[in-house]
Image (tube, rainbow, N blue to C red):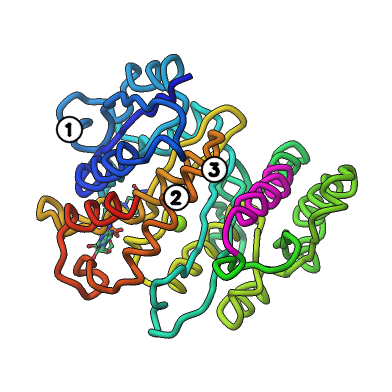
Amino acid sequence: KPLTIGLIPADGIGREVIPAARQVLEALPSDVMPAKLSFVDLDAGFEYFQKHGVALPTETLAALKSDCDGALFGAVSSPSHKVAGYSSPIVGLRKQMDLYANVRPVISGAAATASGEKRAIDMLIIRENTECLYIKEEELVDGADGKYAIAKRRISEFASRRAGEMAFSMALQRDAMRQQLPAAERTWAGRPKVTIVHKSNVLSVTDGLWRETVRSVYEGNPEYKARVDIEEQLVDSMVYRMFREPEAFDVVVAPNMYGDIISDGAAALVGSLGLVPSANVGDSFVVGEPVHGSAPDIAGKNIANPIAAIRSAAMLLERTGYGSAALAIYRAVDKVLATGQIKTPDLGGKSTTSEVTEAVCKQL
Ligand code: NAI
Ligand code: MG
């Protein structure tokens, strides 16, 4: 059965890094990628909005739903002022396709960290992506002592349970992929581990429900209990520990806002934004998306780092059941980074987007 991937480059460097990711997918040898790949080019973005008055066309959504097994999204340029009728296409996509978790691996691999030292960071952050404070129920009130503002925070059993399920199942999936690696290349030697992030010592009702629900997913599943370890970490000490000993984490699962903050912080541990991939994941669909934005300062110059997009493509493969193909891409990228020769300017090099992409293809 062929694997059909929707390609949504959208704005700015999205138009350079998504074609690069496609080129790498097409270079996968058939022993690691048994299925035939086909691609569907799809529109979205701010520039599209300026021409057509809509940022996420219904044709794009319809094609994703009827023809595609997954998609790759580049980046959108968001206007800094409010523009009538505009709403972010990636936010719309997450809603429409019920992509309820944002998954972000933070991998040091062979790349030097920001400080130049090498540490084996191989962490996967799973951020619940539908609720928490981001339901945007805010209110400004004229109080007796002046104005105050209040925000609601929604934590549901339903959303917490499916985020928890995803964390434990991905912990097992990662473990299975690691077993394919030679021992010397495994960054995580022990049993898979899930760290539950919360602040239930203060927010005992909302974070309390989150914590209990995620724990109950674990307690209720004999396979998880037999094969995965769990620990809990208050969000503040999570940040501290993550910067002190990032190599101590495997899978980390967090409510929306904590997850947003720790995942951006974690990206700083591994250097350039141009290296960090993500995936928006639901039960039946996945959209790979580099973490960076449209980078207007470097767009159109063929110098954007394609690695975040290439790794996002690998995440898509991992999630659609092609773990060996994903692993081949991760390793090819690591090898290119390890040579230290072929790198884009954000990593201190002089190579172009095309040169890095070709180097990855060659490793494959
Ligand atoms: P940005 O991520 O686009 O750029 C930040 C800095 O990192 C820039 O100096 C850029 O050149 C550099 N950079 C980013 N990706 C790179 C890559 N692949 N290779 C080399 N260098 C890279 O964030 P910024 O500048 O805050 O936002 C620019 C636009 O992107 C805005 O309109 C913003 O709203 C949008 N944006 C979109 C996101 C998305 O689509 N998910 C996420 C973040 C920002
Ligand atoms: Mg963020």
Residue at 55 percent of width and 39 percent of height: 319
Residue 73 is situated, as x and y percent measured from the top left of the image, at: 35, 39
Is 175 part of what is drawn in magenta?
yes
6 and 265: which is toward the camera: 6
CA distance separating discs 1 and 3: 39 Å
Identify the image quadrant of residue 51: top left
N-terminal of the two: label 1 or label 2? Answer: 1
Measure how far apart labels 1 and 2 are at the Cα level: 39 Å
Type of the residue with mark 1: Gln
Choose between 158 and 352: the one closer to the eye: 352
- Ligand 1 within 8 Å of disc 1? The answer is no
- Tell me the crowding category of disc 1: few under 14, some 14 to 19, or many 20 or more residues within 10 angstroms, Cα based: few
Count of all numbered marks drawn on residues in the image: 3
Q: Is residue 151 visible?
A: no
Q: Which residue is mark 2?
A: 328
Magenta span contains residue 243: no
| Residues packed near mark 2 inside 10 Å, few (<14), some (14 to 19) or many (20 plus) | some
| Element type where label 1 sits in the image | helix
Which label is found at residue 50? 1
Q: Amino acid at mark 3?
A: Gly
Query: Type of residue at label 2?
Result: Ala
Q: Is residue 194 above or below residue 224?
A: below
- Identify the residue at the far left of this view: 301
Magenta range is 163-182
- Prevailing secondary structure class for the magenta stretch in the rendered image: helix
- N-terminal label among 1 and 3: 1
- Residue 323's label in the rendered image is 3
> In the image, residue 246 lies at what x, y percent?
58, 75
Indicate whether 291 appears above or below 53.
Answer: below
- Which residue is more in the foreground, 69 or 57? 69
- Say the numbered circle drawn on residue 303: none
Q: Residue at x 79, y 50 (%)?
A: 214
